[in-house]
Amino acid sequence: MPTITDVVCPLCGCLCDNISVEVEDNAVKKVSGACAVGRAKLLGHESRIRSPMIKEGGEFRECSYEEAIRRAAEILAAARRPLLYGWSSTVCEAHKVGILLAEVLGGVIDNTASVCHGPTVQAVQGVGLPTCTLGEVKNRADLIIYWGANPVEAHGNHMRRYSYISKGWFRPGGKKDRKLVVVDVRETRTAKMADLFIKVEPNKDYLVLAALRAIVNGFADVIPDEVGGVPKEKLVELAEMMKKAQFGIIFFGMGLTQSRYKHNNIEQAISLVRDLYAFTKFAIMPMRGHYNVTGFNQVCTWQTGFPFAVDFARGYAWYNPGETAANDVLSRKECDAALIVASDPAAHFPAESVKYLAKIPLVVIDPYPNLTTEIADVVIPSAISGIEAEGTAYRMDKVPLRLKKLVDSEFMTDEEILERILDEVLKIKGLR
Amino acid sequence: MAELLIKNGIVFDPINGVKGEKMDICIKDGKIVESVSSEAKVIDASGCIVMPGGVDAHTHIAGGKVNAGRLLRPEDGRKGLEPRTSVCRACSGYSVPNTFATGYRYAKMGYTFLMEPAMPPLKARHMHEELMDTPIVDKAGMPLLDNNWMTLQYVKSGDIEKLAAYIAWMINATKGYGVKIVNPGGTEAWGWRKNCGLEDPVPYFDVTPAEIIKALAEANERLSLPHSIHLHANRLGQPGNYETTLKTYDLVKDIKPSRDRQVMHATHVQFHSYGGTKWADFESKADEIAKYVNRHEHITIDLGAVMLGDTTTMTADGPMEYNLYLLTGRKWTNCDVELETGAGITPFLYSGKVPVNTIQWAIGIELALLVEDPWKVVLTTDHPNGGPFITYPILISLLMSRKRREEVMKEVHSVINQRAVLPTIERELDWYEIAIMTRGTPAKILGLHEHGKGHLGIGADADVAIYEISPEETDAGRIQKALLSAKYTIKGGEVVVKDGEVVAAPEGRTFYVDVRYEDEEVWKEMLGDLERMFKEYYTVSLANYPVQDHYVPKPYVIKAGAAE
Amino acid sequence: MQTITLEIREKVFEGVAKVPVELDGVTPDALCGKSADEIKEMRVWWGNRQEKLGDLFEVSVEGNAEKPDDVKIVCKGDFSVVKRVGEGMSAGEMIVEGNVGMHCGAMMSGGRIVVKGNAGCWAGREMRGGELIIEGDADDYLGAAYRGEMTGMTGGRIVVKGNAGDYVGYLCGGGEIIVEGNVGILAGLGMKGGRIVINGDAEAPGGEMTGGTLIVKGSIKDMLPSFRFESEEEIEGVKLKKYAGDLAMGKKAKGALYAP
């Protein structure tokens, strides 16, 4: 069987690029180097959407790509406030067409960051981000903190390839040369490995971080005996560990971005890292979920000036999460049509927003059937990026890698479908 | 492609010695030609100045660091909003414009070639993705090669041959243009929150910045690259750094250039020309720096001039940005890149009410006026560090008009009369000297003049800027207006700007150097070292590292070394 | 005195979606001395298209004025789908008889806005002067900064008779905000000047504040651990504890938080 090496895994923000796959009869038969979830995706046992479909009288009927694309274009071109959402499980080449389409339509474009690490982006816009690439952690870090993140279950190879368990230039002993701290609301599998586990009461991270900052900044005296369920001694111990580390890193997950005080948790955590520069070297990094959620934010930033939640109604980019993110325009019923690409908001958005999404004309581009395709009016199947189509993705530390095409596909790529929709929209608007 | 005839303009083409002569320029198939047929479209340039397209030798326009700056500053993004037009994509930003705005706004100023000077090799693909999305202009990027662990090890072992082989591999892998050096040793030290002076050993690597600079200069000449080393010296932005700067320049004075050019290009020298011992006695040492440059032939500089106002500072010099953050308390981003380099970003307001900022403003202008030979000086603001590139017309008007300088000097802090040289300088640059600093010198120092850039000789790229202004005009306001909105910009023979508006937005090309290192033994040994670095320490595989051709859809390849 | 009445038409509410209309540029400054016909011809954004103001609003004009100070604009009907009402106004008066959408009074530098109902998020964003009275509730980001800016409100006065949402006075640098009812999380977040008074309850007030005065008279949930108790003081007849902070910000923290 032909073996393809150095395959980049299109699953999570780790973008492990040391995967080998064996291909036979145009199918991936064997995968080595990937975590269990990555392997499952690469082996491709999930069911697929077989054909483009249009819903009529409440029932889907199969149709040609041409017909589905034309219908999609009609829906979008007619809309006064179309929403273009998703993007995190497809490649940057598709993002570029999507952003151009949003610009031509005068629509709102947003990616899944707005429901995962959007708060991180907002925090960065408040205070900045002292960060690094993952290899800096691998080679230098002697203190690794996971806060509201559980890589053992969510980012299978993260610790082995990039952090606690990996071996590096200045840390040849791997975990023997490092300390692991976990801060979370429950004792996760990651927490069980930790040298120090700090259990925080749910929704009190902001208070705990404020206390840590005050301690680091020389005001330990004002801190009460307990903050957010954590005894003061433990906070002082952690602050000392951080100050004494040679190179420390905080990896944080949705436990921090999606709990109470959201982006302010992140602002505090970033500010804590910045404050620690008075003593030592430190960095902080979000544990990004979907493999290319970072890529969309990058492309959207260089093309529009803003990372997500961009409203092109007036022909220029207006950015204001809270007003222009997907759930904002859905929950306030502002959008009158939607295009969802490579994402399943019906599974993740608040019930009211999903109910509204079902009421408006909805076009979905995705390789797989999901809850959102069920409520769609037009469904367009696409090739799986990173398996059936190549393209660019950005790792959680913003390192870009080129995904490979491993097998052929009967389906069009996201990029091709979007280009065809764009072409039809331009025709309808008399611009082509 | 259609023929064009630019008639009756006053032409400034320094590389060909054309100094304000009334002459016609003929264009065919994207190149300057001797003559065109009677079918040629005629552009009447009567009463206008005609120059080659501008070349910016140092401007941070694309890549991870620039994008981190955009992401950091939505408040800057909303300052430059422009809606989509039938030709242009939507624009945003002032000091950190989106890629589309970067291309359009440079083109409107008559610029047609841009050099991104700080590409982290690991993120080279990102820079190229942004360059692809920067319309109209041609461009290139220089990989950072001075804090790389491979470099540090070869410098330590004194192995210039392997260093040259490594540089060749990296320039090819990143589709890069030349060797960029940023705070050598200091950026690696920043991995431990430390910094390095010129003679300080780099932690754990036991080499000094001085050794790194010399070795890279030698390796650069060993490969006979089109550009010399491009150096951001140690101690940027620190009071009293001019002594380090002068010592740094002196390091390479005995190295023989492999081509007819400088051995070292020192960049954004304004930031390196500081006297005093602390902020309180901070003063200009532009005169000392200029004196050195005037007496030596191995060095060229660009200004990195400061223009007063708000901007975003960004550099691979991580410790410098942290220090700047400590001064302002504003937001701060840092990103260290494994085995290679780093980056720091923080917003900054240069205020004429602040003594230090006032002196910084003076120094950039002083350097341009005190260095006697304009062929040693490139006009830059180190965009966006000293100010956004769209302030170039303001900078040029200050260089051309003493009257305008005096007006500004009356408004800024009076410290300028004690601790800067500017009030005593009478020199006013003329259009020919401006053309040298914005076209001739940048093209020559980069080696681009051999590839059709920076001049209007027969066979050159038909990149032309036409400004509606008389060569006799001395009014600063009119100079600024003319330079900000070119009457015409022609790129590769196509009219892209007319009356200050973008009328066509073709894709530009990306220039990169294809350099071969010929000793197979050495090459193999270097590859062995490289493979080990990837296997043990990088977090990406060697096979996935080099930039694929896909990311340079419109390449222009310059061969160097054994590939030449 | 010129009184201009804008009554929103049913047309705006047709269909499933509530696409917002944006009313920036329709201020006493811009409308001063204009006739009803002229005003009807003005363009406003409704989603991705510009429409004639007169197509979306019934417009009537009484009297005339020579300067914006003498102009009063009355907004009738459900303006909860109308954004940017009074954005950037510098003089005169705007009365919204019911609820109003986002960004009401954003960047206003003078004049007066009265909202009889509730106001959407970012009311009084980056306000520099004038007065914004909200008789109902205000949503999140009252008198706040725009994303990424260093400073939000720098002057003027905002009064909310009901409750307000999260982030009241985010990055406040000057001016005054008074909320009669309760507020959400992080009132006075990052404030460095000005004065915010909350007569009701608050959650984690004063986070990251470095200056200014923040007074909470009701109860506090999640009092931040990083404030130092200084003294007891009586403010407007209520006995309160004075704290200095937020010490998470280190030595530069010079804010005053008054809490029960």
Image (cartoon, rainbow, N blue to C red):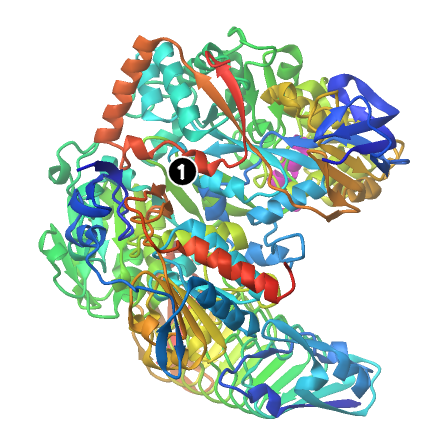
Residue A190 seen in the current view: yes
Instruction: Look at the image and tell me in which quarter the N terminus of chain B lies.
Output: top right
How far across and how far down the image is residue C157, in percent? 58, 78
Residue A49 lies in quadrant? bottom left
Residue A271 seen in the current view: no
Residue A368 lies in quadrant? bottom left
How far across and how far down the image is residue B393, in percent? 73, 40
Please tell me which residue is depicted at 56% across the width and 55% down the height of the picture.
B77
Please tell me which residue is depicted at 56% across the width and 92% down the height of the picture.
C98
In the rendered image of this protein, does residue B91 appear above or below residue B162?
below
In the rendered image of this protein, does residue A51 appear above or below residue A306?
below
How far across and how far down the image is residue B380, in percent? 64, 33
| 10 Å crowding of disc 1: few (<14), some (14-19), many (20+) | many
Q: Is residue A262 magenta?
A: no
Looking at the image, residue B130 sits to the left or right of residue B81; the answer is left
Q: How many marks?
A: 1
How far across and how far down the image is residue A282, in percent? 30, 44
Looking at the image, residue C242 sits to the left or right of residue B325; the answer is left
Q: Is residue B357 magenta?
A: yes
Q: Nearer the viewer, residue B419 or A282?
A: A282
Residue corresponding to mark 1: B123
| Residue numbers of the magenta segment | B350-364
In the rendered image of this protein, does residue B462 appear above or below residue B154?
below
Please tell me which residue is depicted at 19% across the width and 57% down the height of the picture.
A45
Tag 1 subunit: B
Magenta stretch: helix, strand or loop mostly: helix
The amino acid on which the numbered mark 1 sits, given as a three-letter code, is: Lys
Q: Nearer the viewer, residue A37 or B374?
A: A37
